[in-house]
Image: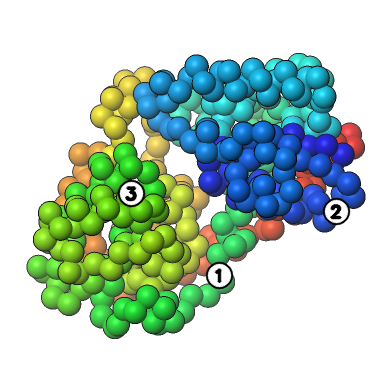
Amino acid sequence: MKIGLVAGEASGDLLGAGLLRELRARVPGVTFEGVAGPEMLAAGCEQWEPAESLAVMGLVEPLAHIPRLLRLRKSLLRRWQAAPPDVFVGIDAPDFNLGLEKKLRKSGIKTVHYVSPSVWAWRKGRIKTVRKAVDKVLCILPFEKTLYDSHGVDAVFVGHPKADSSPASVDAEAARRALGIGSGELVAVLPGSRAGEVARLGDILANTARRLAAARPGIRFVTPAATPQLRSMIEQQLAAAGVADSFTVLDGDSETAMMAADLVLLASGTAALEAALLGKPTIATYRLAPLTYAIAIGMGMVKLKHYTLPNLLTDEPLVPEFMQKMAEPATIAEAVSEMLDDPERRRMIHREFAKLRKKLALNADQRAADAVIELAHS
């Protein structure tokens, strides 16, 4: 059996690696080829192009990359039409993969899309595109399958890989010892993993920390920096806000930072779900690039009651959200203080997050492999 794959950025690479390992264990002689990151490469995929080449996001930001991405998609299409795989699996990166999947499917190649595009959040019309492009969608959120079922799209809820990999219990004291941080109030601050996010949110979060440090003597903060470049940017922002002495800055290791903390303050995104799966009270904030936000609102592309995944999955405002103009240091600092001063609320949030983890931890790698094998043999 031969499987073609295209994974977008680091998160897709991790998903792909888990799927590859499960398929390799169950299908003798299976081979893998396509766009892959280092994790998929280590799991045995022949890399035609690195996954990082697809790591562009937003509405406006990717425009400069369109010619290169179109050339890549055309090249992949030619190669797979000439030597078809038994199944093609597009992992995330919907703006790239759905167009490729549609053309491959027209050529008679069976197609799977792993990780639904956020059709429930914006551009709902993409469901029609998905229906034309794929034989099967592998969903990591339960409400996605319900939505696809109502539109006649074959979808499987496989569970969420993050829930499978997150520890079932958290030892905050051990995490603090590992980081060399003592007792006392500790807030993990995660400003994002991309330069644009850190540029838009870093100063806001640093000044939030400044207000908290003034109001709550002894409070400390821990911040994981995704790259050396982002570490330099974050350290400059902390120095400018006058709070560098209150921070421990790490090279990566966001999970340990969150495990050690009493509360997590983060850029809304997958980190919000990761914090929830660790049972940590969380406050989220985000600012899109101004032009991206204006286009999204102007086209009616964002119509959500909640923005963070924990809130969407529970339909409860467990994670306070401060988006765009609401993302102000004074407002966020007040919310952090209220949460830290309310232990019963934190315990309630912990209980709800434990329930959420049970709903999502279903062995996604195994379920995804089941779906791919079933399609290959159909």
Amino acid bearing label 2? Arg
Q: Nearer the viewer, mark 3 or mark 2?
A: 3
**Disc 3 packing (10 Å; few <14; some 14–19; many ≥20):** few
Amino acid bearing label 1? Pro
Check residue 167 in the rendering and tell me which mark sits there, or answer none.
Answer: 1
The secondary element bearing badge 1 is classed as loop
Q: Which residue is drawn at 23% across and 57% down?
A: 235
Give above or below for 170 relative to 283.
below
> In the rendered image, is residue 301 in sight?
no
Check residue 176 in the rendering and tell me which mark sits there, or answer none.
Answer: none
| Picture coordinates of residue 196, whole percent (x, y) | 31, 39
Q: Residue at x 29, y 83 (%)?
A: 183
34 sits left or right of 258 in the view: right
| Picture coordinates of residue 12, whole percent (x, y) | 58, 43
Give the position of the N terminus as an image quadrant.
top right
325 sits left or right of 267 in the view: left
Q: Name the residue under label 3.
A: 229
Asked whether disc 1 touches disc 3, contact meaning CB atoms under 8 Å apart, the reply is: no
271 sits left or right of 68 in the view: left
Asked whether disc 1 touches disc 2, contact meaning CB atoms under 8 Å apart, the reply is: no
Q: Which residue is drawn at 55% across and 65% down?
A: 166
Q: Which residue is drawn at 61% across and 54% down?
A: 161
The secondary element bearing badge 2 is classed as helix
The secondary element bearing badge 3 is classed as helix
Amino acid bearing label 3? Gln
Check residue 26 in the rendering and tell me which mark sits there, or answer none.
Answer: 2
Q: Nearer the viewer, residue 225 or 334?
A: 225
Q: Which of 157 and 70 is in front in this view?
A: 70
